Image: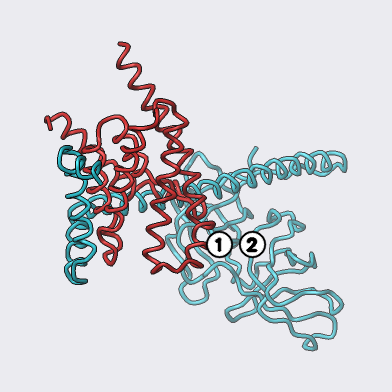
Chain colours: A red, B cyan
């Protein structure tokens, strides 16, 4: 990993920390909270490679998990699994269209949150269902909207760089 | 299975993924104390500085919000007072018009001539001598004398720059006065003691303890509306025709210092 790449990686991790401490509360609407980390994981896995995706997933996941010590590692594991899933899907499906990327973000957020809350609630399906409609689906929808903006801007930025 | 083993063995990215996933699961299955220690360490390393910044930003935001709130209140007050001021100005103009219509004399202004007491009758405090009168100001007798609290007395004689003042506490001093609330007229005089007496108020007139007594201007010597004191006691029955009304003067006649002579401006 070159120093430029390392710098970019550190910048991304820092942006996650800044987002979680300073911005996350401001962006929360009701029970829906955008998952910026998962958006970045999908974006890195699709535009860089799997190593980038899982490395970022592990570090950001562990940092995020430090808020809930009893489940330290769970978020990181699910995020790594999400990155691997995105990578495997991207090998079989064309992912150059923005809508596909947004769909992948929505699917990863849904899968991640459902599995996370199932483990947290000790596989209590009733409680899981309640959380699904109250928190998980609104968060996935909100994250998809944010992802649409972020991925569109990122794609445009890359195109401009390529053309210039 | 063949594909999985190929991926794991051949592809570096998958090996990295498996390693990191294993490390994550290792964290998840650590003893409770160890997990808490690791979490605390991560929080300290990554979050402590940012939470400090967040707290400071929150404080600044609260201060800004308070300032914004105070600003809104002050703006509302300014608007309120501007409206009140406009209304008062309109009332002033209306008052002037009505006075003109009714043929009232315009309330005349007075010049204030400052003076200092250089001598005071120490026992009975009936008279005082003033000095430091500027030679440019021609002072005559029978001019009202006041201080910041209210009416003090009137000038009686002038010799060079020395002026003698007859205080309200002199038995010879009489002032036409009225109750500021009920507009009842009377005469203020001193009959001994600490208080003044509001005389010539008939038994049927209404006056209340606490009412302010001011000059009525009817005697022609003192302008109207100069404060004199407040009613401290009202008695009925001592006189067959009048109420006995005690008035506590606003002016402390035992501590007179700077006085002003009121002279009608030309």
Seen from this angle, which residue lies furthest bottom? B237
Residue at 69% from the left image edge and 53% from the top image edge = B223
Question: Badges 2 and 1: C-beta atoms under 8 Å apart?
Answer: yes
Give the vertical position of A51 relative to B227 (above or below): above
- Report how far apart the C-alphas of labels 2 and 1 lie in the structure: 8 Å
Residue at 81% from the left image edge and 79% from the top image edge = B242
Q: Position of residue A45 (x, y in %)?
A: 29, 36
Q: Secondary structure at mark 2?
A: strand
Image-based side of A129 in relation to B153, left or right: left
In the rendered structure, find residue B149 and report the number of the disc placed on it.
Answer: 1
Give the vertical position of B143 relative to A98 (above or below): below
Image-based side of B254 in relation to B245, left or right: left
Give the vertical position of B78 relative to A132 (above or below): above
The residue closer to the viewer here, A52 or A156, is: A52
Q: Tell me the residue that label 2 is attached to.
A: B227
Q: Earlier in the sequence, mark 2 or mark 1?
A: 1
- On what subunit does the disc labeled 2 rest? B
Q: Position of residue B235 (x, y in %)?
A: 75, 85
The residue closer to the viewer here, A91 or B98, is: A91
Image-based side of A149 in relation to B177, left or right: left
Q: Position of residue B38 (x, y in %)?
A: 17, 62
Q: Position of residue A80 (x, y in %)?
A: 28, 47
- On what subunit does the disc labeled 1 rest? B
Q: Secondary structure at mark 1?
A: loop
Residue at 47% from the left image edge and 49% from the top image edge = A139
The residue closer to the viewer here, B248 or A87, is: A87
Numbered circles on residues, count = 2
Image-based side of B8 in relation to A85, left or right: left
């Amino acid at each position: 990993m070159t120093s430029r790449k390392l710098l970019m990686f550190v910048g991304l991790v820092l942006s996650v920390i800044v987002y979680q401490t300073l911005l996350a509360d401001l962006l929360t609407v009701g029970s829906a909270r955008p998952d910026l980390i998962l958006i970045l994981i999908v974006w890195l896995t699709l535009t860089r490679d799997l190593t980038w995706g899982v490395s970022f997933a592990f570090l950001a996941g562990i940092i995020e998990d430090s808020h809930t010590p009893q489940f330290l590692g769970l978020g990181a594991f699910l995020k790594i699994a999400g990155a691997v899933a995105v990578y495997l899907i991207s090998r079989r499906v064309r992912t150059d269209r923005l809508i596909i990327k947004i769909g992948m973000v929505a699917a990863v957020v849904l899968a991640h949150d459902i599995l996370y809350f199932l483990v947290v609630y000790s596989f209590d399906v009733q409680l899981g269902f309640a959380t699904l409609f109250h928190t998980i689906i609104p968060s996935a929808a909100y994250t998809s909207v944010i992802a649409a903006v972020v991925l569109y801007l990122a794609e445009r930025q890359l195109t401009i760089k390529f053309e210039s | 299975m063949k594909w999985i083993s190929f991926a794991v063995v051949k592809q570096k990215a998958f090996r990295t993924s498996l390693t990191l996933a294993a490390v994550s699961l290792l964290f998840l299955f650590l003893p409770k104390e160890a997990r808490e220690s690791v979490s605390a360490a991560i929080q300290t390393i990554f979050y402590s500085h940012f939470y400090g910044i967040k707290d400071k930003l929150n404080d600044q935001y609260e201060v800004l919000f308070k300032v914004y709130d105070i600003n809104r209140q002050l703006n509302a007050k300014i608007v309120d007072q501007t409206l009140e001021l406009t209304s008062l100005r309109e009332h002033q103009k209306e008052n002037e018009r009505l006075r003109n219509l009714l043929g009232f004399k315009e309330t005349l202004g007075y010049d204030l001539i400052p003076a200092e007491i250089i001598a005071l009758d120490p026992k009975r405090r009936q008279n005082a001598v003033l000095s430091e009168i500027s030679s440019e100001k021609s002072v005559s007798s029978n001019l009202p004398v006041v201080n910041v609290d209210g009416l003090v007395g009137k000038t009686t004689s002038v010799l060079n720059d020395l002026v003698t003042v007859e205080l309200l506490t002199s038995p010879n001093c009489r002032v036409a006065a009225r109750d500021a609330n009920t507009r009842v007229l009377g005469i203020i005089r001193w009959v001994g003691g600490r208080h003044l007496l509001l005389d010539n108020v008939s038994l049927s007139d209404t006056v209340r303890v606490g009412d302010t007594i001011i000059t009525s201007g009817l005697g022609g010597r003192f302008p109207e509306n100069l404060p004199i004191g407040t009613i401290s006691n009202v008695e009925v029955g001592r006189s067959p025709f009048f109420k006995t009304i005690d008035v506590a003067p606003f002016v402390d006649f035992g501590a007179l210092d700077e006085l002003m002579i009121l002279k009608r401006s030309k």
